[in-house]
Each structure stands twice: as C-alpha cells, then as structure tokens.
Image (spheres, rainbow, N blue to C red):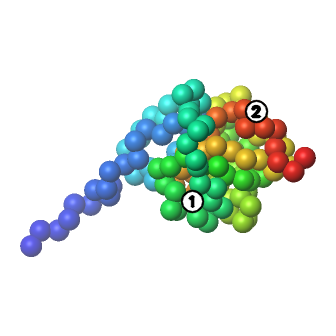
Amino acid sequence: MSQPPLGPSPLPATSPTEGSGDVNLPADTGTNATPVPVVFDVDFDFSVPRRRPNGRLLQSCIGEHVSLTCRFKERLNSGMALVECSDGHAVQVLLPEDTDLEGPILELIVFVLSTTVVRLVRPPSEMGEGLGK
C-alpha cells in the first residue's frame, strides 16, 4: 500500500492574486506565486444588482461582486487594509497603493476572494464618500 506524498496539498493553489506589495492570501499553498498589482475594473457594470452581505455571510459570496458596508480599521501594508463589517467581522481588502478608505461608514464594491479577503473593484470616491455623514 503506497503512502500519499508529503508536501504541499494537492489542491490547486490560488492563482496569482491581484495584490500589491507583499500581499499573500491565506489560501497560498507555498507556490511562491508573484502577486500582481490591484487595478480597478474600468468596465464594471453598475446595472447588475449586487448582494449586500455582512461579513459572516461572505462565505456564500466567494467569486462574486458584492457591496460591503464597513468601517476602516487600519492599513496593513501598501496594498492591503483591514476593515470591520457591520456585524464586527474583520476583512482584509486588497487595493491599489494610493487608495485611501475614508469616511465613518464605507460602502465598498468588492470581489470576494475568501471569507476574510476581498478585492476592491471601484475607487471609493466613485461610490460616494461614505454613508451616515
């Protein structure tokens, strides 16, 4: 009876993530994938309805564009920020280096990569300066 090989998981690694700087997604299986810079989706279709999940419901939205209501917590590095969703769930947001997340309550259009990592699709200024001002 043969033993399974030791080493990285046979599951496919996350494709090179659209990140900036030293961004590594938790799903990275050690393939040393080189991240590429995050760029905004200039052809984004605003007419398509998007779900508005709270942080804990992101699991059901992986691979989708959603509107995420959150508060900025801290900048983690040049290409990633930490936000807190309306239900208190913390999420990492991949974003271009010069992007600022301002406002007491933000509504971000994001692409869900995992339950804890999303990618900003449109600049926050195009979504409004914030809700509840």
Q: Earlier in the sequence, mark 2 or mark 1?
A: 1
Q: Which residue is most to the right?
A: 133
Q: Amino acid at mark 2?
A: Ser
How many marks can you see?
2
Task: Estimate the spatial distance between the alpha carbons at disc 2 and disc 1, rounded to whole Å.
Answer: 23 Å
Describe the element under mark 1 as helix, strand or loop. Answer: helix
Q: Which residue is mark 2?
A: 125
Work out whether 64 lies above or below 95.
below
Other-residue count near label 1 (Cα within 10 Å), few / some / many at <14 / 14–19 / ≥20: many
Front-most of residues 124 and 97: 124
Other-residue count near label 2 (Cα within 10 Å), few / some / many at <14 / 14–19 / ≥20: few
Q: Position of residue 109 (x, y in %)?
A: 64, 43
Task: Give the left or right position of residue 124, taking residue 34 as reference.
Answer: right
Q: Quadrant of the N terminus?
A: bottom left
Q: Which residue is mark 1?
A: 58
Q: Which residue is most to the bottom?
A: 1
Task: Give the left or right position of residue 34, taking residue 40 as reference.
Answer: left
Describe the element under mark 2 as helix, strand or loop. Answer: helix
Tag 2–tag 1 contact (CB < 8 Å): no
Front-most of residues 71 and 44: 44
Work out whether 120 lies above or below 54.
above
